[in-house]
Amino acid sequence: MPTPQPRYSAEETARRGDEIYERDIRSQVEATHYGKVVAIDIASGAYVIDDNALTASERLLAQHREAEIWCVRVGHRALHRIGGRPMPRNA
C-alpha cells in the first residue's frame, strides 16, 4: 500500500503538533508519563503514549490510518538528544 502524501509541510506539522501538545495534552501526561513519547495525529488531535516513538506511532496509525504524526517526549524539549543532559523536571 503506497504511503499517502503529507498534507502539511514539516514546519506546519511541528507547529501544529507542539500547539496540540501544549494546549490539550501536556497537563494530562506530565505528572505520570515523564520520559515517555506521545505520538499526536495533528489533524484529529488523537494521541498515544508509549516508551518510544516507533511503537507510539505504530499504535496511533493502527487507530488512525491517515494520521500525520508529531512526536513529543514528555518533560523534554526534544524527542532525541545527542550528548548533553536531559532538562530538569522542574524547568
Image: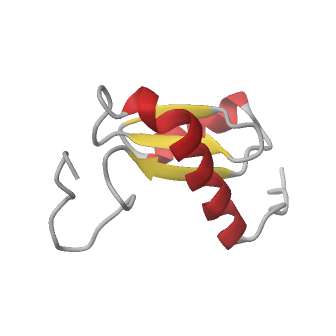
Q: Residue at x 84, y 56 (%)?
A: 4
Up the image or down, 68 lies above or below 24; here it is below
Q: Quadrant of residue 31?
A: top left
Residue 89 seen: yes
Q: Position of residue 88 (x, y in %)?
A: 16, 53
Q: Answer with left or right where residue 31 lies relative to residue 59.
A: left
Up the image or down, 30 lies above or below 1; here it is above
Q: Quadrant of residue 11?
A: bottom right
Q: Residue at x 57, y 41 (%)?
A: 23
Q: Answer with left or right where residue 34 lies relative to residue 55.
A: left
Q: Position of residue 64 (x, y in %)?
A: 74, 34
Q: Residue at x 80, y 57 (%)?
A: 3
Q: Position of residue 5 (x, y in %)?
A: 84, 63
Residue 59 seen: no
Q: Answer with left or right where residue 52 lies relative to residue 57.
A: left
Up the image or down, 15 lies above or below 33; here it is below
Q: Position of residue 7 (x, y in %)?
A: 84, 60
How many labels were placed on the picture? 0
Image color mode: secondary structure
Q: Nearer the viewer, residue 25 or 67?
A: 25
Q: Residue at x 19, y 59 (%)?
A: 86
